[in-house]
Image (cartoon, rainbow, N blue to C red):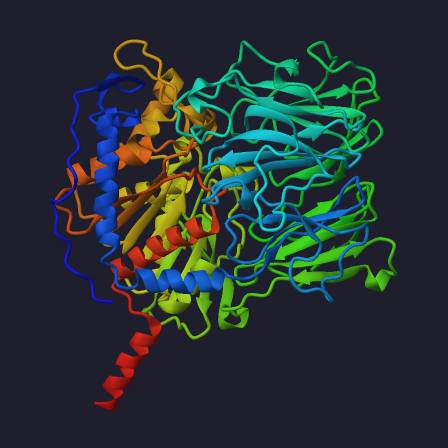
Amino acid sequence: MEKKAWEPGRYPSARRGDTYDVYKSAKQGEVKIHDPYQWLETSSEETTTWIKDQVEFTNEYLNRIPDRTRLKTLMMENVDFEKFSAPSRKGDKRWYWYYNAGLQPQSVLYRSVDEKLPDFSKIEGPGGEVFFDPNLLSDDGTAAIAATAFSEDGKYFAYGISLAGSDFFTAYVRKTSSPFRAIDGKRPAVDEDIVDTLRFIKFSSLEWTQDSKGFFYQRFPDRESHGALGSDKAGTETEADLNATLMYHRLGTSQSEDVLVWKDDENPEWLFGAQVTEDGKYMAMYISKDTSRKHKLWITDLTQNEIGPNMKWLKLIDDYEAEYSILGNDGPILYLQTNKDSPRDKVISIDISQDPPLFKDIIPEDPNATLVQDELYLYTKSGQKLRRLAEDFVGSISVVAKEKDTWFFVTTTGFTTPGIIYRYDFNAPEDTRWTQYRETKVKGIKADDFLVHQEWYKSKDGTRIPMFIVRPKHIQKDGTASAIQYGYGGFSYSVSPAFSATILTYIKAYDAIYVVANIRGGSEFGEEWHLAGTKERKINVFDDFIAATEHLTKTGWVAPGKVAINGASNGGLLIAACLNRAPQGTFGAGVADVGVLDMLKVNHERFYSGEDTELKHLVGRAWTSDYGDPHVPEDFDFIYPISPIHNVPDQELPPTLLLTADHDDRVVPLHTFKHTATLQHKLAKNPNPLLVRIETSAGHGAGKSTEKKVTEAADKWSFVAYSLGLQWREEKAQQHSKKDEL
């Protein structure tokens, strides 16, 4: 499509203040850093005006993109297919699963009409009956289920509802005999049949005790800023997440009567997670101080302790040495997955009846294992390997299983396959135990039209990095294609194959390819791979990603300057940093979603400006395990040189789109606001646009409605296509045909 020339210097105005922040450097001593847009960190009339002006300015630009509407229409058509989860049987003997007819804002929780598992080889549509429809909670589809838990007896359903994308949620309890669904087309009242209501919950599961009398959960202190029950103000505040407590709620009582299980006044930043073993005997408490793969693990015997602050704990793991996750138990023998002395993880058992507890390796670490693509094996509890399942599948695998069941379900997902659900039944004859249960069928996208392969490239320091390349079948390695290159590179998060109808729609429409670079900082090759992309080694992440683009152009997969880079959250930092660092012309466009862009503000509650003035900005302090702490002089010296907002280069940047949301309480919008203002000031005459897209009634990403997801995708990728000067495939074919006729 023909691209109109950009007119520099028309950005909305933003006042530059004279605020200076004081830090300490191991190399330079006291350092004063100018923070001219600190006023954008707080809500004010000035900030509101700036946001309004930016929204109008960006929309004016997006509206001029010829393919924007057409791309969104096609994406909506291709997203319109049935989606569902694997079923799970609850204590009422019924089966429950999620289902979305195609374009519903949120998936609906269905259940079987009786104890029989539905046979979807003979049933079309959702099957069963609606049990809980979150789409009835709001008019705009922004109320989403954040957590669910059924009581052991199956009589009660506890569920968390997040509004407008906030990480905070309110938990409700209702009887399973009282479904939340429309009756004769009429929407039920939101509070209809509610047994209990609990507020101020974040980063928590809901863990029922086996007697079905109550559940454990983590909460934060009351916040006036959240407004009344049902308000969507949660997520817009800038208060620090401090003083979490682990609580026990007894069914039928008010939240004010909940029992305190644990708190730590000396460590207000720590978080607490609960897990009750399936036999109901033990409760495990996971204690985390940051986002690293390290935590404490304490165990209490629920049959020997009254629930409360005086419970006796077996401090099984009482230092931050590694990550442990309980998989199950046989009485006092716990089975756990851990990275202790095994960067690529292993399975161990711990006999807590022994004094001291007896640790034993069950499934040793596989030094060749990767998390780039999943493999599924069956083992005995003694560690004997029985067989591999889904041997020919390449992609991501998830399992739904319970110790007491004689079956489990497996969902497989790939770049071109949205999902196939399998069932394994231990009671069936050996040759029929593994069967396909249900397959997702997409209307407008055919898996056979695409090819997926993995290849390796070398980073700046010689490290070999893998990447996945997804392309339409007809795309050749001739140096003419364009690409979207995605990455994350942090917090031990592995980017595994995932299905995206909007991405496939884009690359098919524009003869493009989609690339996922599995760079350092993730856990694709275990904890060592993660640590190689943290703190003073964070630069490796950026070098890996830039090298991926260079590899694509050198090997002929894409044309020079035709790679658009994208990432979200930590990946947003990745994009902004790479745009700053890469030689001019390396990238054709950059799209940074909800990024961490002011790295000196990742630990706000300890921040001071000249004097000890406390600022409170949410969860950033937990990120110091990956980023370092800017208030530690040695860390400041490696953080400041890579912080995007402080290192905008004096060179041309490609078309850039930053994205944020007004209810993002994980990476607060100030990062994107301030970086936008900085780019538009320092590079006011940049020949390419530097824009921000600000979403309303949305958060960090979770809980977005289908409509919001598709609209955002259409805006992002039409911006990229327009920036790269791409043509719709059919139009390009017509032009070639006319040339041939001449």
Q: Looking at this view, is 536 or 719 the one in front?
A: 719
Residue 479 in percent (x, y) is at: 32, 69
Query: Which residue shows up at 30% across the image and 25% down it?
Result: 43
Quarter of the rendering occupied by the C terminus: bottom left
| Residue 272, placed above or below residue 710 | above
| Residue 392, placed above or below residue 188 | below
Q: Looking at this view, is 391 or 93 the one in front?
A: 93
Query: Which residue shows up at 37% across the image and 40% down it?
Result: 696
Query: Which residue shows up at 72% across the image and 9% down it?
Result: 310
The quarter of the picture where residue 265 lies is: top right
| Residue 490, placed above or below residue 447 | above
Q: Looking at this view, is 651 or 107 the one in front?
A: 107
Quarter of the rendering occupied by the N terminus: bottom left
Residue 334 in percent (x, y) is at: 78, 31
| Residue 434, placed above or below residue 94 | below
Direction from residue 671 to residue 703 in the image, left or right: right
Q: Looking at this view, is 505 or 49 the one in front?
A: 49
Task: Spot the residue most to the bottom.
Answer: 741
Residue 246 in percent (x, y) is at: 62, 19
Direction from residue 194 to residue 495 in the image, left or right: left
Q: Report if residue 272 is visible in the image.
A: no
